[in-house]
Image (tube, rainbow, N blue to C red):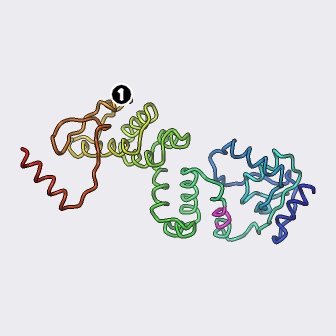
Amino acid sequence: MSKNKKKQAFNSDKSFSEIELFKLCEPAYQLRSAIDDSALKELVESVSALGVIEPLVVAPAGDGYEIVAGHRRFLAAKRAGLKTVPCVIIDSDANKADVIKLHENLFREDLSVLDEARLFAYMRDTLHISENEIARRIKKSDNYVHQRMSLLNATDELQEALDKKQITFTVARELSKIDDETAQREFVRAAVAGGCSDLTARMWRQQYEAQKLADETPRVSVHSFATPQAAQEYKFKCEMCEQKVSYAEVKSLTVCAACYAALQAAKEEAE
């Protein structure tokens, strides 16, 4: 069975046209800032074996068509040596909300956190769709959308570290709350240089906020955290014995109000 016949077999219930690849142009709005080459290689292997199962969505543009949805499938088809791909053609004057609905389907293709955030920002700023409505459309919580969009206000250094997977989303979210850009960059550099757990990032952010409240100037240095060794040496005060301990020695305990009061009472008796 030929590739084209296989494609038609998988798409027999859909109305689509076979369009030559050279007539397709890159999408005007890119969902991704980067394409994962290993993931694309897997898709190329799938396309080589089965053809393009899901049609691309395209709109008339000049003498050809602009890709609205299915950019990765287009790239995989080119690498696989296909001459044509199945496409659903939409009206170039289609309602923008309908086009965005097609984009929503691309969330199956594992967008990065920042790519999601950029798409949310595009929906909000260009299409005037509220964050609440975005959340409803993609079936996620309002907090899911807000947390990702807030990262777009972080420093370029933080965004780059997150894009390169040098820090996790949770670490990025904590460090993005450090509102002094110079301090935020220093904390990001420390996290990248020595590694940073979610707990460590939270402690750094809390310590920054505590110092900011205590000091007349909001400028807080990260010199104590510049290396993994220095971060380990930074001391926190134990609320029970009041000794200084490193963050690695800090333990948390979830207790109810009554048990907390009992612990405090026991501490006072011991004193």
Q: Position of residue 148 (x, y in %)?
A: 49, 55
248 displayed left or right of 94: left
Q: Position of residue 165 (x, y in %)?
A: 54, 41
104 displayed left or right of 187: right
Q: Is residue 150 depicted above or below 104 in this figure? A: above
Q: Residue furthest right?
A: 1
- Residue 102 is one of the magenta-drawn residues: yes
Residue in front for this viewpoint, 147 or 170: 170
| Residue drawn at x 10%, y 53% as measured from the top left | 265
- Quarter of the image for the N terminus: give it: bottom right
- Label 1: how many residues lie within 10 Å, few (<14), some (14-19) or many (20+)? few
146 displayed left or right of 70: left
Q: Main secondary structure of the magenta part?
A: helix
Q: Which residues are magenta?
A: 101-105
- Residue 22 is one of the magenta-drawn residues: no
Residue in front for this viewpoint, 161 or 51: 51
Q: Position of residue 203 (x, y in %)?
A: 32, 43
Q: Regarding mark 1 in the picture, which secondary structure is present there?
A: helix
Q: Is residue 223 depicted above or below 178 in this figure? A: above
| Residue drawn at x 58%, y 51% as measured from the top left | 115
Badge 1 is on which residue?
Answer: 229
What type is the residue that disc 1 sits on? Gln
Snapshot quadrant of residue 138: bottom right
- Quarter of the image for the C terminus: give it: top left
Q: Position of residue 193 (x, y in %)?
A: 45, 31
| Residue drawn at x 62%, y 46% as measured from the top left | 33
Q: How many marks?
A: 1
| Residue drawn at x 20%, y 61% as measured from the top left | 257
